Image (cartoon, rainbow, N blue to C red):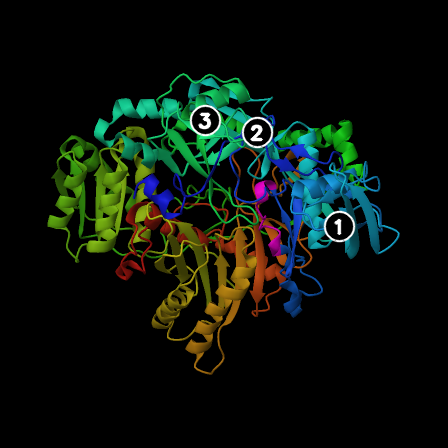
Amino acid sequence: MSGRARAKARGVYRGEGTLEQPGSPRAGYSGSSGPLALESGRDDGSSHTRAGNSPPKFGFSAGSAGYKVMDRGGKIRCNFSDMGVNTREKMEHVRDSKTGSSGIPVKVVTNLFGLSMPREWQLYQYHVKFNPELESKRLKAALVYNHPVFKGKPVVFDGVSTLFLAHKQENEVTELFCETQRGETVKIIITLTHQLQSSSPVSIQFLNVTFKKVLKKLSMHQIGQNFYSPSDPVEIPQHKLTLWPGFAVSVGQYENRVMVCADVSHKVLRNESVLEFMTSLYQNVDRARFPEMCEKELVGLIVLTRYNNKTYRIDDIEWSVKATDSFEKRDGTQITYEQYYKQQYDLVLTDLNQPMLVSELKKGRNIDKPRVVHLVPELCYMTGLSSRAKSNFHLMKDLAQEMHLSPETRHQRLSRLADNIQRNKDARLELENWGLQLGCQASLTGRVVPTEKILLQSEMCMPMNAGDWLRDMRNMKIIRVARLENWMVVCTHRNMDMTHDLVNCLRRVGGPMGFHIEYPRVVQVPDSPLAFVRVLQQNVNPEQQLVLCVLPSDQKDCYDSVKKFVSLEQPIPSQCVLARTLSKQRMMMSVATKMALQIACKLGGELWAVEIPLKSLMVVGIDVNKDAVAKGTSVVGFVASTNASITRWYSHCVIQKAGTMTADCLKVCMEGAINKWQTCNGELPARVIVYRDGIGNGQLRMVVDYEVPQLLSVLNECSGGFRRPKLSVVIVRKQTLCRFFTEANRNLQNPPVGTVIDTEATRPEWYDFFLVSQNARQGSVNPTYYNVIYDDNGLKPDHMQRLTYKLCHLYFNWTGLIRVPAPCQYASKLTFLVGQSIHREPSLELADKLYYL
């Protein structure tokens, strides 16, 4: 489907929605001064007719089920909706305390700042009514902000009916009178509806909006949820990239108080306009396929228009609209795109024949029709990195030097932000008007849990480095693996010599680890992507154990076609390796060692284990990702252990047409996992612990109310009226703002591996904790956040934390610790393979093998 067809399917197409120009002025509402503030640009009347009234830039909306903050552009931020989900109160064993005690105490510095406020601080919410009733939000806002009672005082009004004040009015109902410019008298009736404590969800949302205003006072620009400084760019000219430094800031209610969490952020911009990209593409592809290839490459990308520092998503390319075409301004006059940009921004377009990019604007309140803008490719700059750029080692290394900050540097940047807020008069007053003051960075006490022993076939090793124990287990035999006797290698004639070298190295490294590898059948193919699949179709049979393909290039089509065949048409474990990887002779033994371990996994082998005190325990990992090709579909990965030592796995993948991150198929997946466990062990598991990854902000309620019942229903049904397996469900989040550092020799460094944080930085209504389970070779370590949302296993916090840490050792594709429990990482790898290469549900004949590593 073309980009235009996709946009048209969503109702976004020329003539079907309301058209606007980027940078058109839009009314916003300031909380402390001025009745109206233009969002951007000059008010030259160049906005097109809008679909409904403009939503407030910063404001609040009150609904029957509660209160939500309206963020920039009328978007309702969903990440605050998690605040109303109290899961801890239902768990009796952690109701009084969720803090563990095992491990060595360690003092930790955080990126959390105290937020000082009076002991009796409250936010006063009022309902506003106008008599006679007014339709215009701008007029309502002007009347409220300009009234002598509110003028010059801290006020936030959403332009509809909700007003927030820092101080309580004398009467619960107050009547005010004012006049419009036409001399009409309007009565404003404000009624007190809520007195909100600092910990209430509405107050927390309000404080987040306030800090957005503070960052704007520091001349920072909002892009997405974060704020950046375009005036202080970091240029990386050798890669045509620019970094904008900035910050991600969030206010939240933590265990004992409200605090501000701030972290350093960077926005990656390419110094290449969309027009330059299109020109380069035009010169390198067939002319007839250019529009198709252009839409394939550009639709879905996020671009930045530097004349107003705003980002847009490309939803379509309108080839028939040129810069010399005209559109209608708000006052009814016509103007060309060329003239508009010259008048509005003093920009001269050099190519008047370039097509227009189409972007669908996010809908605000009371807006039914889609709104779109036309963007000029010459003025749009792509953000982020392409897949080709990400595979460029030198580019990523240069980026890492700027973006992966050491703990000390990160701490200094955050301290500088706090100082700037205190020194900037406008920013400081924005807080002081509401009785707020930014405090110092918080410190707390964490614990470092004991190091785990790695168990092999007849020996065990205590890793010298928890990040990588490959050297420690050298010459030790892995737990179990089948002999590799019937297998095939496919390569081109040009790569035949290095293929033989690889096979010899595999056989050499396999012996010491207890993996017997016979010599394979080697088949030569022409240097063509289609040739690989053709040879596989002619030579693969169900008796074969493995197919190894030495690919001549990193062409995605070739890799995808191989994986589709061996996962769908002829289910068989496969291993692909690039010829370029084998070209470095001195690295061949290292490559062969890692490949041998990977192949052993794909044959159903068990590499190593850790001590698991809980008996008859099944652990499950769930992840959901979007399909890269089939828009509107999502891929659910479900991986469950099938033995007591948690070294064998059952994998199931389901493609959902809904396109949501909600898993609708958990009953089917759990039934398959329970049946496999019974087949392997002759009984039901006593306990099931599920780690759910892939959950975004605002989706906690969905998991609690929709996914947990699916899992419980399967366990109830399979128990047949007898004692059902006990269930725990843990949310896993890799992306978290919180950072933790330890102090050594008057410098900050990353905390030790195994550090657990379960006090002060956690939330009072949740059974949650942070765990550092990886070594950061460069920059600052990013802890993983765990939230236990259901738990009738009744495990002590110590036991849940230790078990989670143990599971981070069991990912067989890396001889070291990883950030998340192994089943989560397996599920992630499974969804990646299906979503990027296969796009169909793999055969269940491979379910007991880690074929996707």
Q: Spot the residue most to the front.
A: 183
Queried whether the magenta region covers residue 465, the answer comes back as no
Residue topped by disc 1: 257
Q: Position of residue 498 (x, y in %)?
A: 21, 33
Q: CA distance from mark 1 to mark 3?
A: 42 Å
Nearer to us: label 2 or label 1: 2
Is residue 388 depicted above or below 195 in this figure? above
Residue 114 seen in the current view: yes
290 to the left or right of 809: left
Q: Amino acid at mark 2?
A: Gly
Please tell me whether mark 3 sits on a helix, a strand or a loop. Answer: strand
Foreground pick, 45 / 661: 45
Viewer-side residue, 154 vs 91: 154
Residue 262 sits in quarter? top right
Observer-side mark, 2 or 3, equals 2
- Start and end of the magenta stretch? 72-82
Q: Quadrant of residue 605?
A: bottom left
Q: Amino acid at mark 3?
A: Tyr
Give the residue pinned by disc 2: 45
